[in-house]
Amino acid sequence: MYRQAIGIQDFKIPIRIKEKEGRLQNTIATISMQATLPSTNTKDWAAIFTQVTHKYLDIVSVESFATILSQLSTELDAARLELEVDFPYFLVKRAPVSKEPGLMEYHCSFSGGIGEKEDFMLSVCVPVTTLCPCSKEISEAGAHNQRSKVKLSVTCKKTIWLEDLITLVEQSGSCEVYSLLKRPDEKYVTEKAYNNPMFVEDVVRKLALLALDHPDIGWFSASVESYESIHKHNAYAYVDSDKIR
């Protein structure tokens, strides 16, 4: 007989993420883990959760996540185990004109479970700029624009790197966001956004088409929250592959 799921949440530890180029990036992860354990298990499960987290969550990658799930499940004697690893991920990104380098932060997560079935999901949260088509159409000069948060979650047919998903998302807005911009760069991003106006529904539609066309993406969901610059509310849109296939 098994208990209902028990576990830990909001547990922060240092981990290393494997980058596409093979390097290891140090970051701080927030761990959530729950498991269905036998009712006969009288061990101090809270201590065991903490111990196995430190033991197995050192180097984390898309390739190693299934092994980590298996190791944790075996150690805990779990009928079902679910794990989510959230972390900030940093990439050097060059400004579009001056080519000055700057560090961009992206919020990413690995999540999955093991038991009767095994599953894994990769998520990235990426800022983009969106410019309102309606505002542009009705105004004699200018148009309101804002930073928007785009989240893409996918299941993988083959290994997909965080860098590739981030690039995919950055293609879906009116313009990309940069951490460092000189005057020529500001001119470029302002004009690019103005010439590429998009509602939030346009962003998820474009991202969905890019995801559908990607050979290594299985199921996916895409959401956009736009932090409106002239409205009190935020604008939001969502789509997943179940709704369009």
Image (tube, helix red, strand yellow):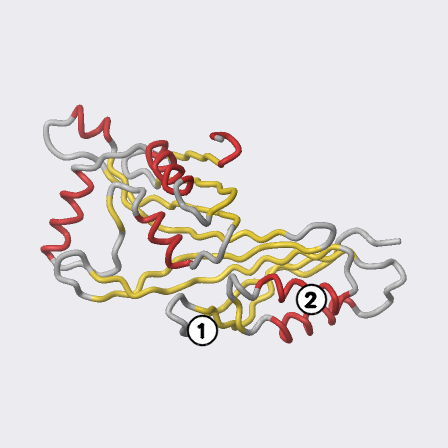
Q: Which mark is residue 80?
A: none
Q: What residue type is disc 2 on?
A: Leu
Helix, strand or loop for disc 1: strand
Identify the residue at image location x=53%, y=72%.
59
User: Considering depth in this image, is 148 or 215 the residue closer to the camera?
Assistant: 215
Would you name the residue on which mark 2 appears?
72
At label 1, which amino acid type do we have?
Asn
Compare marks 1 and 2 and give the one earlier in the sequence: 1
- The image shows residue 12 at horizontal and vertical percentages of 56, 67
Give residue 115's position: percent from left, percent from top. Answer: 73, 54
**Structural distance between the alpha carbons of marks 1 and 2:** 22 Å
The residue that appears at 47% across and 69% down in the rendered structure is 17
**Above or below, 24 relative to 92:** below
Counting from the top left corner in percent of width and height, residue 88 is at 44, 62
Report the side of 11 relative to 46 (left or right): left
Badge 2 marks a residue whose secondary structure is helix
- At 42% from the left and 58% from the top, the residue drawn is 162
Mark 2, Cα crowd under 10 Å, few <14 / some 14-19 / many 20+, is many
73 on left or right of 10: right
Q: Nearer the viewer, mark 1 or mark 2?
A: 2
Position of 6 relative to 45 (above/below): above
Label drawn at residue 26: 1
In the depicted structure, whether residue 156 falls above or below residue 198: below
- Label 1 neighbour load within 10 Å: few <14, some 14-19, many 20+: some
